[in-house]
Image (cartoon, helix red, strand yellow):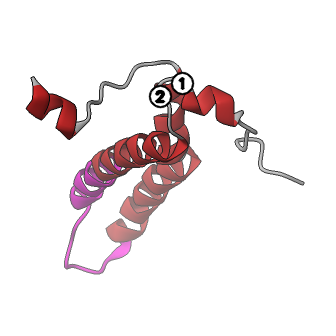
Amino acid sequence: MANPSITTRSTQELVEQTGNIYETVAVVSKRARQISSNMKEELSNKLAEFASTVDNLEEIFENREQIEISKFYERMPKPTILAMEEFLEEKLYYRKRDQEEKL
């Protein structure tokens, strides 16, 4: 049974904007890294609120909150899926370096 978040994509659809499948993969992967970094930083900031060096019964209740926050982030769509959706909806801005130098 396949994961419901897995979708077959047409290579023609992916090549339309860039003209090159490898360029498309590079654009999407860079955006996915940005999204992943932002999500990781956001999660770290939320979990840092619970940082404690004392072991006691209160920590057990705090751990439940940490677990809920972690589960929320685990259920979120993966950064690559979000980046691909942004690319296909033409919400990404990108440019080639050599084009910039020619201007």
Q: Quadrant location of the C terminus? A: top left
In this picture, residue 91 sits left or right of residue 76: left
Going by the picture, which residue comes out furthest to the front? 102
Q: In percent of the image, x 43 and y 42: which residue is there?
A: 23
Q: In percent of the image, x 70 and y 36: which residue is there?
A: 9
Tell me, for residue 9, which label it has, or none.
none
Which one is in front, 102 or 55?
A: 102
Rendered position, 53 above or below 31: below
Q: How many other residues sit within 10 Å of disc 1, few (<14), some (14-19) or many (≥20)?
A: some
Question: Residue 77's spot in the image, x, y percent?
Answer: 55, 42
Q: Quadrant location of the N terminus? A: bottom right
Label 2, secondary structure: give it. helix
Report the amino acid beneath label 1. Leu
Q: Quadrant of residue 102?
A: top left
Report the amino acid beneath label 2. Phe
Question: Residue 78's spot in the image, x, y percent?
Answer: 53, 47
Label 1, secondary structure: give it. helix
Rendered position, 92 above or below 40: above
Query: Is residue 31 within the magenta segment?
Result: no
Q: Which residues are magenta?
A: 39-57
Rendered position, 98 above or below 60: above
Q: Which residue is mark 2?
A: 87
Q: In percent of the image, x 54 and y 29: which residue is there?
A: 85
Q: Which residue is mark 1?
A: 88
